[in-house]
Image (cartoon, helix red, strand yellow):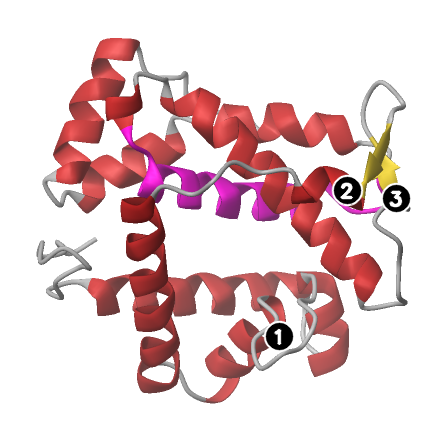
Amino acid sequence: MKAFLPPLTQQEEKEYVTRMKGGSLEARHVLVERNMRLVAHIVKKYQNVDEETEELISIGTIGLIKAVATFNDERGSRLATYAARCIDNELLMYLRSKRKSAKEVSLYEPVGTDKEGNQIRLLDICECEDPDVVEELDLRWRIKTLHELIPQLLSGRELQIIEMRYGLNQTAPLTQREIAKKVGISRSYVSRIEKRALQRLREGFAGREDAFGQRIEKP
């Protein structure tokens, strides 16, 4: 795996979280980048799962981004503690969706094993804490806004790749390699299109007011 930036100290983390709450996208990006090591660490648990490490890193990063966006430091815990659960859940949910797209499964059916050889069951995915109301409202707003921005800002191949990549329109999400094979282009080209489309969507959020009336800064 690639080398990642060192994690933030507790004081640095508090400062960046405060700046992020003030609307700084730069602070949010730093919090994500400096916690990528955590994603790589958690992905190691799934080394026996029949999925490419690069794909699992990509899925785990989605969980990290969600964790940073919904983190509440007033609860007294570190971001890494909260993010670890979000990353793990994102990976488990991904494995569940892959299995469900193939056949009907039982909650007790294993979807893989962790590093210690323990079975990972779908039942494990269902065990989650009650969501914070503020976090839930913010997440719902972001999802709603994202669905509005996708058809507005993306068209042609970008729209096609994003829909296939993230399983929009009630379809199962595909890996970059699966998309490349389906569309007839290279995986690296799929990756470039995906990154360009995601950047366009990030920029689409700029200038808007979030669920609580705070203006979102440009990325």
Task: Specify few, some or many for label 2: CA neighbours under 10 Å numbering under 14, 14-19, or 20 or more.
Answer: few
Residue at x 90%, y 67% (from the top left corner): 103
| Extent of the magenta region | 49-72
Disc 3/disc 2 C-alpha distance (Å):
6 Å
In what quadrant of the picture does the N terminus appear? top right
Q: Is residue 104 above or below residue 5?
A: below
Residue at numbered disc 1 = 164
Q: Nearer the viewer, residue 137 or 158?
A: 137
Report crowding for label 1: few under 14, some 14 to 19, many 20 or more residues within 10 A (C-alpha).
some
Residue 203 higher or lower than 84, as above or below: below
Marks 3 & 2, CB-CB < 8 Å contact:
yes
Sequence-wise, the earlier of marks 3 and 2 is 3
Marks 1 and 2, how far apart at CA: 27 Å
Residue 123: assigned label: 2
Q: Earlier in the sequence, mark 1 or mark 2?
A: 2
Does the segment drawn in magenta span residue 55?
Answer: yes
